[in-house]
Every structure is written in structure tokens, then in C-alpha cells.
Amino acid sequence: MHSNMLTCRTSARKVSFCAILCCLFISFIRVDHLYPIMRISGNIQKVIYESVTEAAFVKYSTVSTVSKNTLLSFNRPDGHNKKQNISKLARKVVPQLTKVELRQIKRYTHYSSPIVVSKYKLIFFWNEKVGCTYWKSLLQFIQGIKNKEVHDPRRNGLTYLIQFKDNDITDMMFNEAWIKAVFVREPRERVLSAFLDKGLNNSLMMDLCGRPSVKSFPEFLAVIKLCKDVHWSSQVKLPRHLYKNTIIGKMPDINKFSENLLTKIGAWNDTVKDWLHSKEQFGRTRHHATSARQKLLQYYNDTKSQDIIFEMYTDDYEVFNFDKKYFN
């Protein structure tokens, strides 16, 4: 009887030990999250793991100090060799985004959501009155989308961030393989463009603000303090901490920024370059042009109107480092 009880206890211990070992093994061989648990010893300069199994559990019998720059190397299941400094071998921490941050990032509708170009791993945060017709047309072209409709997300063929699951959005935002880019415009110029394009248009102002068109630029500045609309809202639409990993382009550098961005994602070539200077593209974008930059001194002829803009768009000036120097 006593012998049988000892046998049962021994068997139970073996089963428990095996179960624990299996759980540990499974937890450390997840794809792309493989970080071995180790006791490093001796003056080891390089350790080569020949397989995932071997990489999962590696132990050394003696313990001594090792430099944080010690290089560890192991062969991945796909055949590629991965090298990692020992200082980075702590268990990988996956950043998280709150529900509020996710809503802020993907926005509320397809009409304002960032554009995703999966082929080139690009998330593009566009803004109204900041060359959005130009950018949507360009992102259509590099994907081979032949569609004359640019702005209607139901028909323009573009993919938007709001279409992705929250977990996928989080992974994309913190994955260095995905390029995040935003394109912005100096607030005084952008607001003036909105005034010239929307504020003086009676039907548009009735649609956007439920009131007739304005008679003057100062009146428009007073109206937009109360009437909230994407065409003159702040361009800071991401949690601030995410901008440190986001490429920022500005309106005066649109041509150079386009080339640099497309080069970075692998989409720049002579065909794209020729298309950007084509009559087709010029005709698409010219329709919305207001020449606001050439009219800045005409409308901002005092400091009062500029101070209003500085106050309304404090976040834009801080995050995108726009100059607050008065026009004169």
C-alpha cells in the first residue's frame, strides 16, 4: 500500500514537471517573440543556436560577468540568422494603445481615416487643406488604382486604417517595418486656404456650419472658433508620443518630401516622377488650389489675426515646430 502511494506521488510529480516544462517551452517559441532564458557564463563572445528548440532553453554551468555588448546569434526557422546584443535579450514588451488613443489614431469615419498602403507598408496621415487631393491621387497611382474618384472612400479604391482591427493597428504603429508619415501645413496659410475655398462659398458654409458665407476674413476667424470642421481643425491627430517615430513633411517641401518618402518605401521610379509632372495630375490638383501662400500678407496685415491663429493652433506650432514669426 505504502509502495503504491509513493509510486503515485512520483508519477504525479513527473506529470506536473512535464506540464510545466511544456508550458514554458510553448511560451518561448512564439514566432517573432523568441527570447531565450539564459544564465550566461565564461567569457562567451558568440553563441550560435542551431534551432528554435535549442534556442528556447540554453544553460551554462558556471556564472561570470559578461559585457552588455556580447553578441548572441541564432538561426531562425526561416533560415535567416539573427544577431542580438545580450543587453536586448530581456523579454520583449509589446506596447499597448488605449481605446481613446486608437479612436484618435484611426479616426471616426473612412472620410478622415489615415490611408494604408500595405504593399509598401506605409500609413499616411493626411490632413484636409494640405494637398490631400495630391496625396490621394499619388497613393492611388503607386498602387495601380485607376480611378478618377479621389475623395469618396467608397469608390476611390484606397484602404483606410479604420478598416483594420485594433490589435493590428497597434502592431502596425509600433512595428518599425511600417513607415508612418504625416503631411502638414503652416496654420495661418491653411486657415486662409480654408477661408478662400470654403468660407466664401455660400452652399459649402451652409453645409459645414449651417450659416451663409462670411463677408470677411476676420468674420471667418470668429466663425471657426465655434464651427468645428476637419478643414480647419488641428493637424495634431495622433497621441503626441507617436510623432517621434513619424516622418513629418511640410507644404513648402512637397516635391522633395514626395520623392524622399516614396524612395524610402521603395515606390519611387521614373514612371512616378513623370506622372507627377503630367497634365493629368496638374488638372486634378489645380481645381482645389487657392494660392493662399501668395495672399498671406494681404490677409494677415496686422498682428491681431495672427495672434488668434497662434492661440487656436498652439498644438500645431509645438508639435510640428512651425515658426511663429509675424508676417510683415
Image (spheres, rainbow, N blue to C red):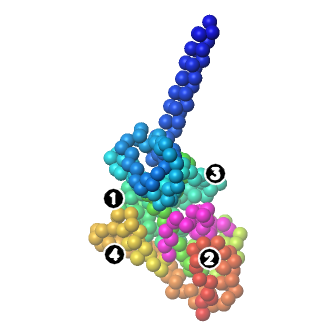
Residue 321: % across, % down: 58, 77
At 62% from the left and 69% from the top, the residue drawn is: 234
Residues tagged 1 and 4 counted as in contact (Cβ below 8 A): no
Disc nearer the start of the sequence (2/3): 3
Mark 4 or mark 2: whose residue is earlier in sequence? 4
Please determine whether, in this image, residue 131 is positioned above or below residue 9. Answer: below
Give the image location of residue 259, x and y in percent. Answer: 38, 72
Name which of mark 3 and mark 1 comes first in the sequence.
Answer: 3
Tell which residue pokes out farthest to the top in this image. Answer: 1
Amino acid, disc 1: Gly
Q: Which residue is drawn at 66% across and 66% down?
A: 228
Amino acid found under the numbered disc labelled 4: His
| Tag 3 residue | 99
Which label is found at residue 277? 4
Work out whether residue 107 or residue 83 is closer to the camera in this orientation and state it.
Answer: 83
The secondary structure type at the circle numbered 4 is: loop
Q: Does the magenta stretch include residue 248?
A: yes
Whichever of callouts 1 and 4 sits on the residue coming sooner in the sequence is 1
